[in-house]
Structure formats: C-alpha cells, structure tokens
Amino acid sequence: MRGLPDVRVDKDRLRRRAAAKRSKLRPLDLRDAAVALRAVLLSVAEVHRSAVVAVYVGVGTEPGTGPLLESLACRGVRVLLPVLRRDADVDWGVYEGPDSLASAPLGLLEPVGRRLGVDAVATADAVLVPGLAADRTGMRLGRGGGSYDRVLSRIARDAFSCIVLHDGELLDDVLPNEPHDRRVDAAATPSGLVRFPL
Ligand SMILES: Nc1nc2c(c(=O)[nH]1)N(C=O)[C@@H](CNc1ccc(C(=O)N[C@@H](CCC(=O)O)C(=O)O)cc1)CN2
Ligand SMILES: Nc1ncnc2c1ncn2[C@@H]1O[C@H](COP(=O)(O)OP(=O)(O)OP(=O)(O)O)[C@@H](O)[C@H]1O
C-alpha cells in the first residue's frame, strides 16, 4: 500500500487479521455469544438505567445484538439504530421490532422508519459501538470508514460508550491510532465487561 502512512497500513493489517478470526466462528458460537452479550450488557448499571440506547444490528460474524434488541424493546427502552449514509456518516432510526429491519448495502440490516438525523445519537444515555477490536486504553478498530469516530464525537458528555466484541478481541497491545480516533468507556465481551481507565 504505497503512499499510505504506516498507521493506516497497520490498521488495515489488523482489520484483516480480525476478520479472518471472525470468519472461523460457527453459527452456534455466534448464537451463544449474542445471548451472553445480552446478559452482560443488561447487567451494566449505565445500560440498565438508560431510557435511550444506541445499538447496532449485528450481521454476519459480528457480535450479535438480536437478543439484546428484543429485551430492550420489551422493557420500553427507546433503541436507536444506525443508518449508513453515502458519505460514511451515520443517521439514526428507531427499532420497532424485527419486522422493522430491512436489508441495506454492505450486508447491513437497517430500520425502515423515519430518519432522525446524525445528531439524534446525542439523546442516547448509552451507545453500543461495533468494531473489530479494542485495546485497554479504550481505542477501537472499526471498519475503516471513520463512521463511529464521527458518532462518538456527537454523543452526550455523560453518555456511556461501549464497544461490543467477541472474546479475544480486547487486545493487550496498543492499537495504532490517529488524531480523529475516539476512545470508548468500556468493552463488552461474552465473558464480561471491562471498563477502561479515564
Ligand atoms: N452492524 C453494523 N452496522 C453498522 C456498522 C457496523 O460496523 N456494523 N457501521 C460501522 O461503522 C456502519 C456501517 N459501516 C460499514 C462499513 C463497511 C462494511 C463492510 O465493509 N462490510 C463487509 C463487506 C460486506 C459486503 O460487501 O457484503 C466487510 O467487512 O468486508 C460494513 C459496514 C453503520 N452500521
Ligand atoms: N470526524 C470525521 N469526519 C470526517 N471523516 C472522518 C472523521 N473521523 C474519521 N474520519 C475519516 O474516516 C477514515 C477512516 O478512519 P479510521 O481508520 O480511524 O476508521 P475506524 O475508526 O476504524 O472506523 P469506524 O469509526 O467507521 O468504525 C479516515 O480517512 C478519516 O479521515
């Protein structure tokens, strides 16, 4: 990748490594992980007491959010879901049940209802963030569009931000990072929650 700064090359290598590892996960493992992640996330005080939670719809081998979405909706929580814009920024819609999701480009599932605008995420008490890996300083590795760096720059100052990962994706090595990268407060894996130092 001639011309690209080292940090971009390093991130890209890590993205490919993470994706290759995810591709080995089996459907039953994915289902178990999604169920465990619901239990972990609902037991987090900041999530438990939230009236508005931004989640994502896990697709493919991503850490699954289906069980969590159902539980939050059943409890009357307002669940915001991302809608990818053509400029890789993120608009938001409300989760109204599994039938309110439709296939979108890149294999995504997105809410069909009204678009609330990119700033709607500022109303969330907790923001659950997709990603491929995180380090123990709270830096995250996303898909490379910078979408969630933009999202994280708009959330409320006291909102709780948490990346959702599979076991083994919270890395001991520090991730390469750039000035625009935004840290999260914690990482949830099927094994539990890890809070990062402030
Ligand atoms: N579930 C989910 N929703 C999300 C994100 C995410 O990471 N996960 N995003 C986070 O920013 C935004 C979407 N950004 C994305 C950017 C790239 C790819 C992507 O390249 N996906 C596949 C290719 C799939 C295909 O072409 O069929 C890949 O990883 O190879 C997906 C989503 C908003 N919504
Ligand atoms: N606030 C922003 N506004 C516009 N572009 C941005 C912003 N933040 C990051 N970007 C752009 O997004 C691109 C990818 O960034 P990066 O590699 O850090 O993505 P990522 O954090 O892995 O992905 P994501 O945030 O989508 O999960 C970079 O070219 C960067 O310039």
Image (spheres, rainbow, N blue to C red):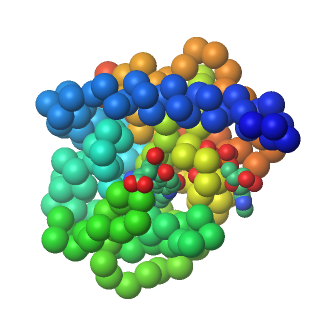
Residue 150 vs residue 133: left or right? right
Q: How many marks?
A: 0
Residue 120 position in % (x across, y down): 51, 73
Q: Between 90 and 192, which is closer to the camera in this rendering? A: 90
The N terminus lies in which quarter of the figure? Answer: top right
Residue at the image position 59 percent from the left and 66 percent from the top: 89
Residue 48 vs residue 91: left or right? left
Question: Extreme top residue here?
Answer: 172
Residue 106 position in % (x across, y down): 42, 59
Question: Extreme front residue here?
Answer: 2
Residue 101 position in % (x across, y down): 25, 69
Q: Between 112 and 196, which is closer to the camera in this rendering? A: 112
Looking at the rendering, which quadrant does residue 174 occupy?
A: top right
Q: Is residue 36 in view?
A: no
Residue at the image position 35 percent from the left and 41 percent from the top: 62
Q: Between 185 and 66, which is closer to the camera in this rendering? A: 66
Residue at the image position 64 percent from the left and 40 percent from the top: 183
Check the image and report above or below for 154 versus 71: below
Q: Is residue 182 in view?
A: yes
Check the image and report above or below for 16 versus 85: above
The C terminus lies in which quarter of the figure? Answer: top right
